[in-house]
Image (cartoon, rainbow, N blue to C red):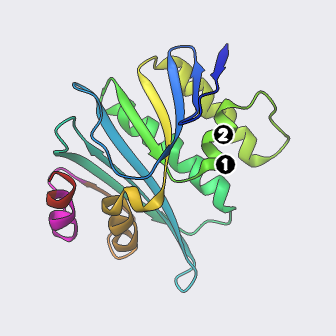
């Protein structure tokens, strides 16, 4: 069962214990003992690939882990962003992380998670799977953020298509060092 709470700012949606929220414009540290996973996707037309990144940081803003992928795929932007959020949820699950806030720059995706009306499309089939996965993890939340709020994820997404098609970084890539420092000041 989901409960929708309408606030002037930001919108919060409950999926059992899970929350879906929107309207952040600056990267913010998650609550104490929580992790934040910024999820981003990009289409690289010149290479005919899509890339995905999920960047995980702790409540002090410290780097935890990054996963990047790229692939040749024929899907819409919304389908790509939904698949990437699902991949990020699986990434958190495999790492046995509890209390994770996932942030996506797709307002449509975040709103679809809170909508009782789901259409007949590939996008909504993925939404159904995400909602199911969230129901299994009571301490996972999904929020909308404006792209400029996660310069780290945006920087990584541009670099991802130059690395092997699936990378996991246990220490931060050099390309985001100064961005992490700026976010923590």
The residue closer to the viewer here, 113 or 162, is 113
Pointer 1 with pointer 2, Cβ within 8 A: yes
Task: Classify mark 1: residues with Cα within 10 Å, few (<14), some (14-19) or many (20+).
Answer: few
Which image quadrant for residue 133?
top right
Query: Residue 12 at x, y = what percent?
Result: 56, 28
Q: Along the horizontal axis of the image, is 45 left or right of 163?
A: right
Instruction: Give the magenta-colored segment's residue range.
Output: 169-180
Q: Which residue is under mark 2? A: 111
Query: Residue 115 at x, y = what percent?
Result: 73, 32
Q: Secondary structure at mark 1?
A: helix
Q: In the image, is residue 170 part of the stretch drawn in magenta?
A: yes
Q: Residue at x 28, y 52 (%)?
A: 66
Task: Classify mark 2: residues with Cα within 10 Å, few (<14), some (14-19) or many (20+).
Answer: some
> Could you say which disc has been placed on residue 108 in the image?
1
Q: Residue at x 44, y 36 (%)?
A: 90
Q: Residue at x 45, y 36 (%)?
A: 89
Query: Residue 109 at x, y = what percent?
Result: 63, 45
Q: Secondary structure at mark 2?
A: helix
């Amino acid at each position: 069962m989901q409960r929708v709470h309408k606030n002037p700012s930001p919108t919060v949606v409950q999926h059992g214990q899970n929350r879906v929220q929107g309207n952040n414009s600056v990267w913010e540290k998650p609550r104490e003992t929580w992790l934040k996973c910024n999820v981003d996707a990009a289409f690289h037309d010149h290479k005919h690939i899509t890339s995905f990144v999920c960047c995980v940081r702790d409540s002090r803003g410290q780097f935890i882990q990054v996963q990047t992928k790229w692939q040749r795929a024929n899907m819409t932007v919304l389908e790509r962003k939904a698949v990437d959020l699902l991949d990020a949820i699986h990434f958190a699950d495999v790492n046995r992380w509890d209390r994770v806030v996932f942030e996506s720059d797709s307002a449509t995706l975040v709103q679809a998670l809170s909508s009782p009306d789901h259409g007949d499309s590939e996008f909504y089939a993925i939404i159904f799977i995400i909602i199911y996965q969230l129901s299994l993890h009571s301490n996972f939340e999904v929020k909308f953020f404006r792209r400029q709020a996660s310069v780290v994820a945006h920087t990584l997404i541009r670099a991802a298509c130059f690395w092997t098609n699936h990378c996991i970084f246990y220490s931060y890539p050099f390309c985001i060092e100064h961005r992490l420092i700026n976010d923590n000041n």
